[in-house]
Amino acid sequence: MRNPVKFMIIFTLLAAVMLATLFTGTYSLTFGDIMSLLTFSAADDVELVFYEFRMPRMLITIICGAALALSGLILQVLSRNPLADPGIIGVNAGSGFGVVLFIMFVSGTGTMNLYSLPLMSFTGGLLTVLIVFFLSFIGGRFNSNIFILIGIATAMGVTGFLYVFTSTFDDSQMTMLNRYLAGNIWGDSWAFVIAILPYIILVSVFVWMKINEMSMLNLEDENLSALGMNVNFEKIVLIICAALLSSVAVSVAGAISFIGLIAPHIARLLFPRNMKLIFAGTVGIGALLLSAADLAGKLLLAPAVIPAGIVVALIGGPYFIYLLMTARKV
């Protein structure tokens, strides 16, 4: 199958999920409602549901799914390990700790503080992944196997600190945190779209500009140094990008794992050896996975809603075990 056909299938599926997300739910929109929206004659309640509830949530799932997938691709390229994922190596745990600090000290003190949530989440995720990265150097060389193991251990430790801090939370704060930990898309308003979109677009464009360096990182560090690349500098820059993408995404989408594991792996199967196509495929598949998970969680047990993070985990857990059993390096 040719590459344009593969992309057409990915984005056709994404468009279908987007339409289903916009027109299904507790308040289902009829064909007449759709026509009235197209002719700008819709009733106030129809416009409210469509523009203020459905559309921002749909955009959040697409943006965050793409960001988590791209973050996973970067980490897999850096570690040369298909098991790398922002959630598995501790980025999500660190971001969650930043969200806990936000709930404790900032939340509810003013509307503008909403925009500090991605920053605090990013800081926690970045510090965590940098600790994991530097602890993965053995004898001055980066060890990708140790990278995964240290990431898992660090995630467990940070999660422990997270629960220590939550012991002082009241009911409303615990409700907010539980929605985050379950991967419930709780940042589903236009304010959150505006808060995260500039970060993710700028970082994604920057990573695209580093696509040649990412293509070369499958070579040994000694060979890259001989070619004139400052290997450690490039890795640190890309790790910061990965932490920013995933941290900002989970700050509004909740603690969602496995998107960064599954999407790059599928993209590599579809577009082998071409990093530009892998990049584009990863972004599209990540957006499709999270938006489809959110749609499935909304429809499977309607009117009850299953958090998107749980739906993704039900798929990603078995997929992770499959990769663990088949990967050459663990």
Image: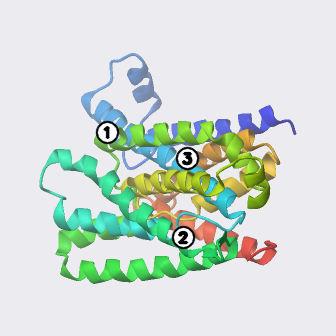
Q: Are marks 3 and 1 in contact (CB under 8 Å)?
A: no
Alpha carbon separation for disc pair 3 and 1: 18 Å
Q: How is the image coloured?
A: rainbow
Image depth: mark 3 or mark 1 in front: 3
Percent of width and height locating residue 152: 55, 78
Of the image marks 2 and 3, the number of the one nearer the N terminus: 3
**188 left or right of 215?**
left
Find residue 190 and name its label: 1
**Residue 86 visible in the displayed image:** yes
Closer-to-camera residue (8/227): 227
Mark 2 residue crowding within 10 angstroms, few (<14) / some (14–19) / many (20+): some
Which residue is rendered at x = 34% and y = 55% of the image? 186
Q: Which residue is mark 3?
A: 66
Image depth: mark 2 or mark 3 in front: 2
Mark 1 residue crowding within 10 angstroms, few (<14) / some (14–19) / many (20+): some
Of the image marks 2 and 1, the number of the one nearer the N terminus: 2
Q: Which residue is situated farthest in the top direction here?
A: 39
Alpha carbon separation for disc pair 2 and 3: 27 Å
Location of residue 184 (image quadrant):
bottom left
Does residue 154 sit above or below 251 in this rendering? below
Location of residue 313 (image quadrant):
bottom right
Closer-to-camera residue (145/294): 145
Amino acid type, mark 3: Ala
Amino acid type, mark 2: Phe
Percent of width and height locating residue 160: 38, 83
Q: Which residue is mark 2?
A: 134
Amino acid type, mark 1: Trp
Alpha carbon separation for disc pair 2 and 1: 37 Å
Which residue is rendered at x = 31% and y = 58% of the image? 120
